[in-house]
Amino acid sequence: SQQGEEDPQALSIQEGENATMNCSYKTSINNLQWYRQNSGRGLVHLILIRSNEREKHSGRLRVTLDTSKKSSSLLITASRAADTASYFCATGPYNQGGKLIFGQGTELSVKP
Amino acid sequence: DAGVIQSPRHEVTEMGQEVTLRCKPISGHDYLFWYRQTMMRGLELLIYFNNNVPIDDSGMPEDRFSAKMPNASFSTLKIQPSEPRDSAVYFCASSFVRSGVYQETQYFGPGTRLLVL
């Protein structure tokens, strides 16, 4: 069963705009991670936020986590055409060490 | 560092044939994961290993699928016999999880694109 559900499924913006993607999940987690996948490639890890953290930054990325609402958001600021990719959230279930459950992903298109 | 290595990168086979996909994880990693990705079902976890031991194979679709990890540097995913609905991209990923309780970054290979005719 799917743990992470992402919203929107697809997002199209202009270069320079901000992109926000949301992820909701169902059960208790140790951490939540975001990955990126360029077309035809493997997934690449972007950022990890632990269950006791509320916000984390990495370059132009900002991730928030609200464990009471079981939701997370990924914000990409000042987007570039090169940010065009699919973005996945992945949750680490509380009692299943090592394992991640991936959402269906958000397909982001950044137009130059 | 070479990263996770998968072979072959592309495989085209006919229904009923045996298919073997191979993966070499990053040296020192203690977890290895096999995923399948399709447009319809997204990214599915098939099976994962910890220190070469299978931990959870509940995602393996049928008995036609089997996976082994004979040592820390090699794993195979075998489909026998293959069917057209097995067509997908198969990813291998590895991770180093210090405690065994939590989850850490997974490093993905480039994937094997399988087409079963």
Image: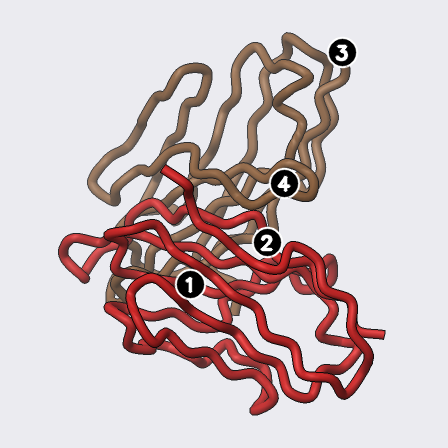
Chain colours: A brown, B red
Q: Secondary structure at mark 2?
A: loop
Instruction: Look at 69% across and 11% down and name the residue there.
Output: A15
Residue A58 image position (x, y, % from top left): 37, 21
Q: Which badge, 4 or 3, is on the more N-terminal residue?
A: 4
Q: Chain of mark 3?
A: A
Residue A106 disc label: 4
Q: Quadrant of residue B31?
A: bottom left
The front one of B7 and A13 is: B7
The secondary element bearing badge 3 is classed as loop
Q: CA distance from mark 3 to mark 2?
A: 29 Å
* CA separation in Å, label 4 and label 2: 20 Å
Residue at 37% over, 31% down: A64
- Residue at far right of view: B117
What is the C-alpha distance between the residues marked 4 and 1? 22 Å
Residue, disc 1: B33
Q: Which residue is mark 2?
A: B111
Tell me which numbered mark, 1 or 2, is placed earlier along the sequence: 1
> In the image, which disc is placed on residue A112?
3
Mark 4 touches mark 1? (CB < 8 Å): no
Query: Callout 4: helix, strand or loop?
Result: strand
Residue A112 position in % (x across, y down): 76, 11
Task: Bin the neighbour count of mark 4 within 10 Å (Cα to Cα): few under 14, some 14-19, many 20 and up.
Answer: many
